[in-house]
């Protein structure tokens, strides 16, 4: 990925980019609906253990998202470069944390990981385009704290990696990152799970929280994904200072790491 921003499209030159970007989203939505009604239920109920069925669906979602990323790349919306990506493809049962500057971050990340789950908002479970996908893939609904922790432990113990965005929402425009919440640290410490940090650098603004999905960026967003080294949860042994203190310390260290890398 070139660190310098690409040319900003204006006038008639922007129309193909806009049509291509909007077309990608429409294809993604329709594809999600169709596969949730056809392919994913077939994979889910094909003979095998529950873990095998969920793994098949997760891999199918990974391939679907990889196809969507290729579509966005072909349309000139994004350009992705991944560093140390083998750390993602080889990870099992880890909490994967990443900063969250754009709308498509989770799609890009899962396109690089055949073995990934995530916590999704209750609203997505009511979305007809996405409900079938998240249910078949064994994703976790964001419900009460104790139930959420129980669900996370089950997913991590099965070997699935759990994606969490500590910012909670997309980065505020003009900020390096939002302040980190302690959710990722609490889950990692209370389930005794190691953390894999992933830093996402972008060289142009676009697909931010302040913009609607159809506001396709006029500059190609260069995305450089750097997969860091695993952070062992044992370094933050809760017996040394209690759950709350260690969660605060781990959250602060994670936020400092991301700020340093992004700045």
Image: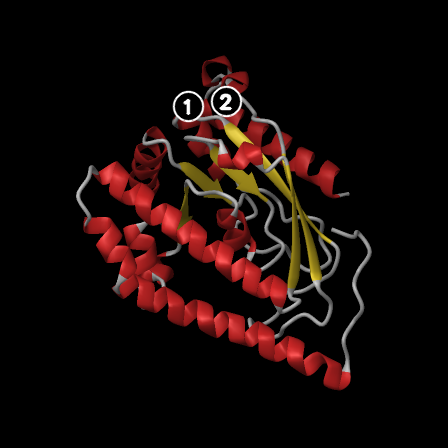
Task: Give 235 or 20, whichever is nearer the viewer.
Answer: 20
Outermost residue toward the top in this view: 240
- Asked which colour scheme the image uses, the reply is secondary structure
How crowded pointer 2 is (Cα within 10 Å; few <14, some 14-19, many 20+) is rated as some
Above or below for 66 versus 207: above
Secondary structure of the residue carrying numbered label 2 = helix
Task: Give 61 or 132, whichever is nearer the viewer.
Answer: 61
Q: Quadrant of residue 55?
A: top left
Residue 208 shows in the view = no
Image position, residue 197 (x, y; %): 58, 35
Quarter holding the C terminus is: top right
Image position, residue 53 (x, y; %): 25, 43
Count of numbered tags: 2
Q: Which residue is mark 1?
A: 192
**Could you tell me which residue is drawn at 64 percent across and 66 percent down?**
77
Residue 263 shows in the view = yes
Q: Quadrant of residue 40?
A: bottom left
Q: Quadrant of residue 217?
A: bottom right
Above or below for 8 versus 162: below
**Could you tell me which residue is drawn at 23 percent across and 56 percent down?**
41
Image position, residue 161 (x, y; %): 43, 36
Image position, residue 69 (x, y; %): 55, 58
Task: Give 22 or 195, whichever is nearer the viewer.
Answer: 22
How crowded pointer 1 is (Cα within 10 Å; few <14, some 14-19, many 20+) is rated as some
234 vs 8, left or right, is left
Q: Which residue is mark 2?
A: 233
N-term mark: 2 or 1: 1
222 vs 50, left or right, is right
Secondary structure of the residue carrying numbered label 1 = loop
Task: Give 229 or 239, whichever is nearer the viewer.
Answer: 229
Q: In 3D space, how far apart are the residues under numbered discs 2 and 1 (Cα atoms)?
A: 6 Å
Do callouts 2 and 1 mark residues in contact (Cβ within 8 Å)?
A: yes
């Amino acid at each position: 990925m070139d660190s310098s921003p690409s040319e900003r499209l204006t006038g008639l030159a922007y129309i193909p980019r806009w049509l291509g970007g909007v077309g990608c989203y429409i294809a993604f939505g329709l594809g999600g609906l169709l596969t949730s009604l056809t392919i994913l239920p077939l994979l889910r109920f094909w003979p095998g253990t529950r873990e095998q069925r969920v793994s098949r669906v997760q891999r199918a979602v990974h391939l679907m998202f990889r196809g969507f990323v290729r579509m966005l790349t072909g349309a000139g919306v994004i350009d992705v470069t991944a560093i140390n990506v083998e750390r993602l493809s080889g990870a099992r049962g880890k909490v994967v944390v990443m900063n969250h500057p754009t709308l498509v971050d989770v799609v890009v990340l899962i396109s690089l990981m055949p073995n990934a789950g995530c916590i999704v908002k209750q609203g997505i479970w009511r979305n007809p385009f996405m409900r079938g996908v998240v249910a078949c893939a064994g994703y976790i609904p964001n419900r009460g704290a104790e139930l959420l922790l129980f669900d996370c432990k089950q997913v991590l113990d099965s070997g699935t990696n759990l994606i969490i965005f500590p910012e909670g929402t997309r980065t505020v425009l003009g900020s390096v990152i939002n302040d980190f919440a302690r959710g990722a640290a609490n889950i990692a410490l209370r389930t005794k799970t190691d953390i894999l940090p992933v830093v996402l650098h972008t060289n142009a603004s676009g697909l931010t929280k302040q913009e609607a999905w159809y506001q396709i960026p006029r500059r190609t967003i260069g995305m450089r994904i750097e997969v860091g080294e695993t952070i062992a949860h044992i370094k933050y042994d809760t017996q040394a200072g209690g759950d709350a203190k260690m969660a605060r310390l781990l959250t602060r260290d994670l936020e400092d790491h991301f700020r340093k890398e992004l700045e």
